[in-house]
Image (spheres, helix red, strand yellow):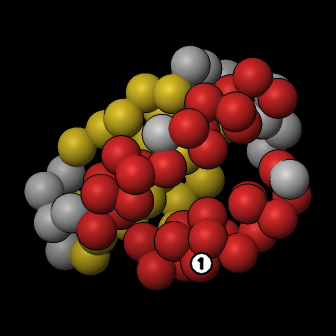
Amino acid sequence: MFIPHATWKTFIERRADIKQLMQSTVPSSLPIQDLNVELVKIYDTNNIKLTLNGTYLNMKPTTALFLFEQCVEHIFY
């Protein structure tokens, strides 16, 4: 999934909101420019769904938090 630089910047700036969404138990969504970050239920399991320009990616919240804390921050800086 290709995420534009401006969206990455906003993603990093809203890190607290994103982490709070990922740790929630109530399905909800958070739009970040063209990227939509959602907490969804799949077979009674919480999942994070990233949607951008008709492309989506699902992952467990623990995986998303790991990627956010380890990979995204490293790649961005």
How many marks overall? 1
Can you say whether 2 is above or below 4 in the image?
below
- Quadrant containing the N terminus is top right
Q: Where residue 19 appears, x then y in whole percent?
A: 39, 59
**Foreground residue, 73 or 2?**
73
- Compared to residue 34, the image places residue 30 above or below, namely below
Q: Residue at x 40, y 51 (%)?
A: 16
**Residue 6, horizontal then vertical, whole percent:** 75, 23
Front residue (pair 23, 60): 23
Q: Residues within 10 Å of mark 1 (few under 14, many from 20)?
A: few
Q: Which residue is mark 1?
A: 66
On the picture, is 52 further left or further right than 76? left
Q: Is residue 38 left or right of residue 67?
A: left
| 11 relative to 71 in the view: left or right | left
Q: Is residue 60 left or right of residue 44?
A: right
Answer with the quarter of the image where residue 63 lies.
bottom right
Query: Which residue lies at the image location 60% right of the left edge and 30% below the top edge?
Result: 10
**Looking at the picture, does residue 6 appear above or below residue 45?**
above
At label 1, the amino acid type is: Phe
Q: Position of residue 39 (x, y in %)?
A: 32, 54
Tell me the SS state at disc 1.
helix
Residue positioned 19% across, 74% down in the render: 44
Is 76 or 27 nearer to us in this picture? Answer: 76
* Residue 39 visible to the viewer: no
Residue 27 appearing in the image: yes
